[in-house]
Amino acid sequence: MNRLSRRLVLAGLTLTPAACGSLLPTGGAAPKLYTLTAAADFPPGGARVSWQLLVEVPTSTAAFDTERIALSRGPTTLDYFADAAWTDRAPLMVQALLVQSFENSGRIAAVARESLALRADYMLRPELRHFEADYGAAAALPEVHIEIGARLIRMSDRAIAASRRFDARVKATENSIPAIVDAFNGAFHQVARQMVEWALDAAR
């Protein structure tokens, strides 16, 4: 291989990770940490409930039970962004954000994480089914996909009072980590808002 050919090959190798959104670890500095925010923009006029709620840590596959930010390029593949991570394991982050979202609704007497052992009337059992940036068929801009199944358990007899699946997709405005995290935030707000209103109405 002559000198010019070697330069072209090296240039191609250098561009590949950038084109993939920096998927491969650089082995340098610690990853930059990101978090999401709780839903807060609830419609006014919802009836307030007097019962108390505990929120369990969402169950999930091992692929999502991590601080790493997941991405998918197809239905059978999953990878992670390099040099970027959530501030906590995704299920723990989602649990805390759901508790805050219920509080922000202003409609419930008390809500807490299941680990605090509050004497509650209902238990919310979420299941984190999708929590990734989906690049689909080599899409230029990823679409964040969040899907959470939920069961509302009546504590008096441990019966399922209601169950539902919540799903949201939000396309990132550009192929960058901050834009993708913003899309995660938008998708989570949609899911959390729907879940809060559903749970409060279903139990009532």
Image (cartoon, rainbow, N blue to C red):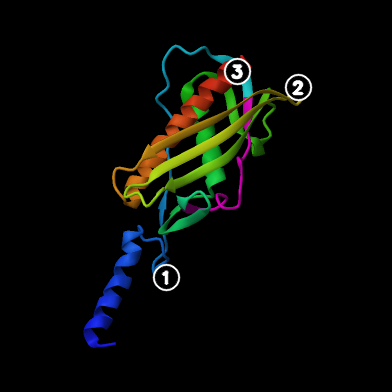
Q: What element carries label 1?
A: loop
Q: Characterize the local packing of mark 2: few (<14), some (14-19) or many (20 or more) Cα atoms within 10 angstroms.
A: few
x%, y% of residue 63? 56, 52
> Closest to the observer: 102 or 5?
5
x%, y% of residue 46? 48, 13
Q: Characterize the local packing of mark 1: few (<14), some (14-19) or many (20 or more) Cα atoms within 10 angstroms.
A: few
- Residue type highlighted by circle 3: Ala
Name the residue at the left extreme. Answer: 4
- Residue type highlighted by circle 2: Ser
x%, y% of residue 58? 60, 40
On the rendered structure, is 65 left or right of 123?
Answer: left
Vertical placement of residue 183 versus 101, above or below: below
Residue at (25%, 80%) from the top-left corner?
Answer: 7
- Residue occupied by mark 2: 156
Vertical placement of residue 7 versus 50, above or below: below
Residue at (56%, 41%) from the top-left corner?
Answer: 129
Residue at (35%, 57%) from the top-left corner?
Answer: 21
Going from N to C along the chain, the mark reached first, 3 or 2, is 2
- Residue occupied by mark 1: 27
| Range drawn in magenta | 53-70
> Closest to the observer: 127 or 39?
127
Vertical placement of residue 151 versus 96, above or below: above
Q: Do the residues labelled 3 and 1 touch (CB within 8 Å)?
A: no
- Residue type highlighted by circle 1: Gly
Q: What element carries label 2?
A: loop
Between the residue at mark 3 and the residue at mark 1, the CA separation in whole angstroms equals 49 Å
On the rendered structure, is 117 left or right of 185?
Answer: right
Quadrant assignment for the C terminus: top right
- Residue occupied by mark 3: 202
